Amino acid sequence: MSELIQMRQRMKAIETIKKVTHAMRLISMSSHARLRSKRGLLEHYQSELIRMIKTIQATQHDWHYPLQPNLDATRDLAIVIGSQKGLCGNFNNALIAFFARSTEQNDPHNLDTIVIGKKAVDLLTKKQGSLLMEFKAFTINTLAGIARKITDYVLAEGNRYRSITIYYQYPKTFFAQRPSLYNLTQSVSDGSQQEQLEPYRWEHDPKELLDALVKKQIEITFHETLLNSLIAEQSARFIAMDSSTRNASTMLDEMRINYNKLRQAKITRELTDLVGSFF
């Protein structure tokens, strides 16, 4: 009888876990849809901003992109975007492994690291020790503030580094996330042809406008990569919670079968003992 009681308690615990994972799966799906709806607007804003920068830059040949790589520098800056919460499979471990492979040729003493997301901060602190900057609270509400602070830092200190690279998880599809990197020291005009557009007349100095627009463009780039990381995180969490829910259902089915077999065996044994006592 005690064995049946223990099995009932285990089944009840698994049912509770199944309800929790199912609820988290629904929350992740809802969050993913909400975040994904913001990405299209952000990408359109980014493309129009870059288009405007190229238009002004075409007439200002003596203006230079503020984050050009400093070939005389010896230090590199890495910005790693992880997650604040867990329960999202190997989301953070895969990202940290990708970051480690990408920077294995770098001298660790000449590598400054900015880490976003509590889980990524904890993992990299164990591996690297001290970090240049860390942002443990990483949600859609803190995203804009993080992007602004990092933008201010890279514009103020960017000439100290020969490269500035962002490492993050890109949502390739809903069911697949890909660790990716983005080199921030590339100019907005790198790798693309200049558009033949009518020259604009500006009230302010074009160079001042370029400085302001490029600052906004860099901030939006951070904003976009942070948003993509959040989208990938919600996808990974949905997959992990969906797998946990399915596993819980499978375990419950198996335990119910074993429970019924054991209960029937005990009933049969008791009936056999009862009938045997009359003869």
Image (cartoon, helix red, strand yellow):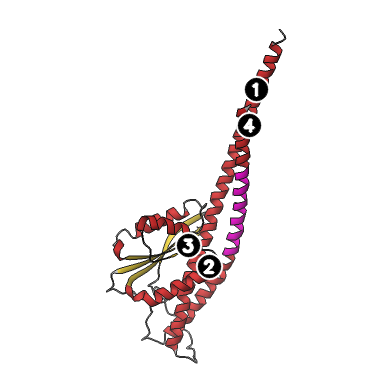
Quarter residue 249 falls in? top right
- The residue segment tinted magenta is 16-35
The disc at residue 136 is: 3
What kind of element bears circle 4? helix
What is the magenta segment's predominant secondary structure?
A: helix
Placement of the C terminus among the 4 image quadrants: top right
**Separation of marks 4 and 3 at Cα, in angstroms:** 43 Å
- What's the residue at 69%, 17% (across, down)? 271
Q: Position of residue 80 (x, y in %)?
A: 42, 63
Which one is nearer the viewer's eye here, 220 or 132? 132
Q: Position of residue 33 (x, y in %)?
A: 60, 61
**Separation of marks 2 and 4 at Cα, in angstroms:** 47 Å
- What's the residue at 65%, 29% (across, down)? 260
Residue identified by numbered label 2: 142
Question: Along the polypeptide, which appears first: circle 4 or circle 3?
Answer: 4
Which amino acid type is shown beneath numbered disc 1?
Lys
